[in-house]
Amino acid sequence: MISVRGKSSQIGQFLKATSSVVPSQSRPVARAVNELKHENGPHEGPAITASALARSLPQRSSMLAVSGSLTAPCQIRLAHTDLKVPNFDHYRPDDRKTVTKNSRESKVSVGSYVAGAAVGVAGLYSAKNTVAFFVEAMAASADILALAKIEIDVTSIPEGKNVTFKWRGKPLFVRHRTDEEIKREAAVNLAELRDPQNDSDRTANPKFLVVLGVCTHLGCVPIANAGNYGGYYCPCHGSHYDGSGRIRLGPAPLNLEVPEHKFTSDTTLVVG
C-alpha cells in the first residue's frame, strides 16, 4: 500500500514526506533541510587575467602590482621582491646624501672650479710666451742664417790647390784635384781604411773635394797638401788624411766630414 502523510501545516515548508513501497503501520519522517537559493546574477570566474588579479588585491595598497601578457603567465610582483637599485652614496658628497635636504644648504664648488680653470689658462699662456721668448733668443741670427748656404765659383780655384772658406763658423776646404789624384784615391783598397768609404761616395764632382777643415780627433784644423798621403795633416796629434779626406794614420777615428753640397752648374758650387 502506498500512502503519503502530511504533518503540521505550520512547519510543512521545512518538512518533506517520503514514500515507501513496503506497507507499514508507521511512516518515517524526513529530516528538515534548508532549500538553497540560487542567484540569477553574473558568476565571477577564477582570477586568471591582469584585471581580475588587480581586483583581488587590497585597494589601498601601493606596494602591489599586477602584470599580464599574452605569451607569459600572469604574476603578482611585490616591491620587496624587485631588484635592488645600485647605491652610489659612496661617490656622492657627504652634504648631498640626504635627499630631503635643501640644495641651497649643500656646498657648491662651481666657483672654485671656474677660478682654477681661469688660473690654469693664464698659466699656460704665460708659459707659452716664456718658451717662445727663449727659443727666439737661442735661434740663429739673420747673419748666421744668411751663411747657411754659400755659393762658390770653382773657376777661381787652381788645379791641385786647396782653398779655405768660412761656412757656419767652421773652415771649409775645397780642393781642386788633378786626374792623377782622382785615379790614386779611387784605387785605394777599402780593407786598409779605418773608416771605409769609396772616393765616389764622398764627392759630387770627382774634380772637387769638399770637406770640413776640422780634425775628427779633437777638432784641430788640419794643414792641406801635407802628411804621408798628400792630403791633410793635423799638427795637434799627427793624424794623416789622404786626398779624399779619409783617415789613414794617427788617432783620428773618422774621415773628415763631407757637408751637403751640389753643383748647380759646371762652375758654381752650393754648400748647405
Image (tube, rainbow, N blue to C red):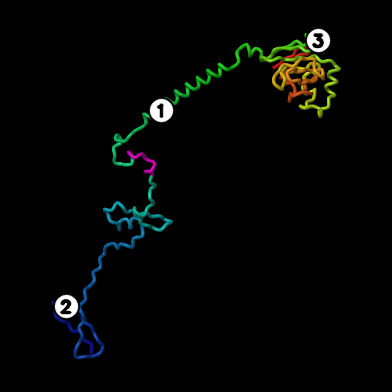
According to the picture, the residue beneath numbered tag 3 turns out to be: 158
Is residue 15 positioned above or below 104 on the image? Answer: below
Q: Where is residue 73 shown, x and y percent of the image?
A: 40, 58
The foreground one among 149 and 89 is: 149
The foreground one among 222 and 268 is: 222
Cα–Cα span, label 2 and label 3:
163 Å
Mark 2 nearby-residue class (10 Å; few <14, some 14–19, many ≥20): few
Cα–Cα span, label 3 and label 1:
71 Å
Q: Residue at x 37, y 40 (%)?
A: 92
What are the residue bounds of the magenta stretch? Answer: 88-95
The foreground one among 94 and 23 is: 94
Q: Residue at x 15, y 81 (%)?
A: 7
According to the picture, the residue beneath numbered tag 2 turns out to be: 12
Query: Does the magenta segment cover residue 91?
Result: yes
According to the picture, the residue beneath numbered tag 1 turns out to be: 116
| Left or right: 74 as drawn, with respect to 133 | left
Dot 3 falls on a residue whose secondary structure is loop
Query: Does the magenta segment cover residue 90?
Result: yes
Earlier residue among tags 2 and 1: 2
